[in-house]
Structures are given as C-alpha cells and as structure tokens.
Amino acid sequence: MTGASSGAGHPALETRALSLSFGGLKAVSEFSLAVPVGGLCGLIGPNGAGKTTVFNLLTGVYRPDEGEVLLGGVRVDGRKPSYIARCGMARTFQNIRLFGELSVLDNVMTAGGVRTRSGLFRTLLRTPLHVAEERALAERALALLDVLGIAHRRDEQAKSLPYGDQRRLEIARALATEPRVLLLDEPVAGMNTQEKRAMRALIQSLREQFGVSILLIEHDMGLVMEICEQITVIDHGVTIARGAPAQIQNDPAVIEAYLGVPDDAAAAAGPEGAA
C-alpha cells in the first residue's frame, strides 16, 4: 500500500517564499522548505510561532498572499483542500477532528472516498461499480486499522476511543486518501511515555510501508531530534534555523527563541543592546 509517486527529480513537497498576513500581522513570512521524497522532516517553534498556519497554507485552508506550494513539482497553492488531498497531501490536526458519531471503520472509509469514481448517481443506485468500490474501501480501511493497531475497535464509535487510539485513527484516516506527503500536527501531544514510544516507532515505519514523505510539527523535542533528518525552526512566522538535529540543538537563535535571552547576555548588551 503506497502513495502516488512524486514527480521525478522534484522534492515531494516544496514551498517558495510563502507569506500570509492577518490584517496588519505577518503570520508567515517568506517561508521556504523542501521535503525530499521519502524524507522525514520536522517543523518546530515556540507556541504561536506560525507552525499550524504553515500547515493550513500547505493544505489549502488558507490562500497565501505570496509564494508557492509545490507537490511533486506541481503548484497547488490557492487550490481547495479537497483538490490538494486528491493530489496527494493529507494531514492530521493538533486538535483531533474525527467524525465522533461514526464507527472507526466508517471514519477511514469516508476518507478513502476521495479516491472513488462511482459518484452520487451510482451510489444511490448501488451500481456494480459502487458496490465493488465500497468493498475495496472496506478492505483497505481494515488493513489500515490493522497497521495502526486498532482493527479490533472497528465497530466502536470514534468518540469512545481512548485518546491515543483517536490519534492512531486520525493517521489511518489520513493514509486512506493514499497520500504521497503526510503532515502530522503534534502526533504525540497528550500521550504518556509508553504511548509516545509506540507512536515514534509507528511514524518511522509509515514512510517505508506506505511510501510517504512526512513533515511533522511537534513540541516533544526528544521525538523530533530522534526521528527527523532535517528540521526547520520558525518564530513569529520567520524561519530562524534549518538543518540536521545536531545543528538545531546548538543553534543560538533556536535556544534564544525557546528560552529567551539569558540574563547575563542581556546585562552584557547594556541599555543600547536591550533597546
């Protein structure tokens, strides 16, 4: 089960000088990024840095004021989220957004409907094409739930799942769209140590099993440093660092963004430096 192949020679996902303002506030400024095919990259920054805004720009929730988003070399900026999903980019959310009243299986099948061809007319008449597609959807959805370790909960309502399993269901639902790029927004938020360890192993296995490239937002720095090959750091919508985990850990701009200017450094700067 693999996602659609990316354009030859192009990054799986690329942004060029993306910018977005809300009124007079610059939320994202000239954001550029390249996620290689098969890559596992991180996007980090303090609270309010603009990380989720970037995801919203990538997936069509927001239209950028300037800049480009390319998926396998094809521009998708400004297009509707449904179009971008069909082109091969799927996401999870910081605040879980499942169809709570639906079963676990139906949540995944609903997402998989992005790839069906039968349409409303054939669905209403239950034509052979619709029946065949529905059977294939159910089989694929069960296979995804099995990979995510929650197939035994297939008939339960999504809202009744434990928190960690809701996170897994959201990933299964994203994978049902057969993405080439998977965006994960804080996948281990609210999890205990054991759950985080299991999710870390799962994320690492996804790109191999499904052929997806992954970009994740995460506040758990241990997780980011362990699994990401390249990390981009933003603060107030501006990119302040980019590089391998070892570079990011020791970057003065990153340390300052997270911890603030040390008191001794501020004192050394004096009144002029503090102005």
Image (spheres, rainbow, N blue to C red):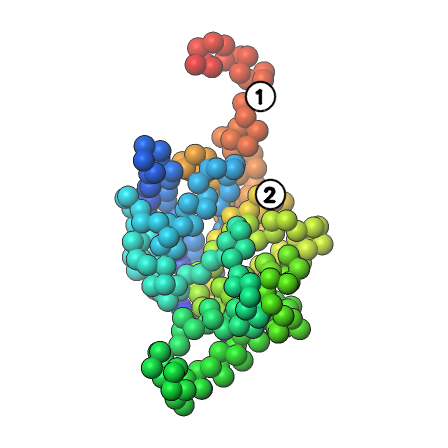
Q: Residue at x 53, y 72 (%)?
A: 106
Amino acid of disc 1: Pro
Give the answer, above or below, for where 141 lies relative to 16: below
Residue 256 x %, y % = 53, 28
Residue 247 x %, y % = 53, 39
The residue at the far right in this view is 194
Lateral position of residue 219 relative to residue 128, left or right: right
What residue would you read off at disc 2? 221
Q: Residue at x 57, y 21 (%)?
A: 262
What residue would you read off at disc 1? 262
Q: Residue at x 36, y 81 (%)?
A: 118
Report the Cα–Cα distance between label 1 and label 2. 20 Å
Q: Nearer the viewer, residue 113 or 203?
A: 113
Question: Total number of numbered labels?
Answer: 2
Residue 91 x %, y % = 47, 58
The residue at the far left in this view is 66
Task: State whether residue 172 appears in this view.
Answer: no
Q: Residue at x 55, y 32 (%)?
A: 258
Task: State whether residue 257 appears in this view.
Answer: yes
The residue at the far bottom in this view is 128
Q: Nearer the viewer, residue 202 or 186?
A: 186
Q: Secondary structure at mark 2?
A: helix
Lateral position of residue 161 relative to residue 63, left or right: right
Amino acid of disc 2: Met
Q: Nearer the viewer, residue 9 or 19?
A: 19
Residue 145 x %, y % = 59, 71
- Callout 2: few (<14), some (14-19), or many (20+) C-alpha neighbours within 10 Å? few
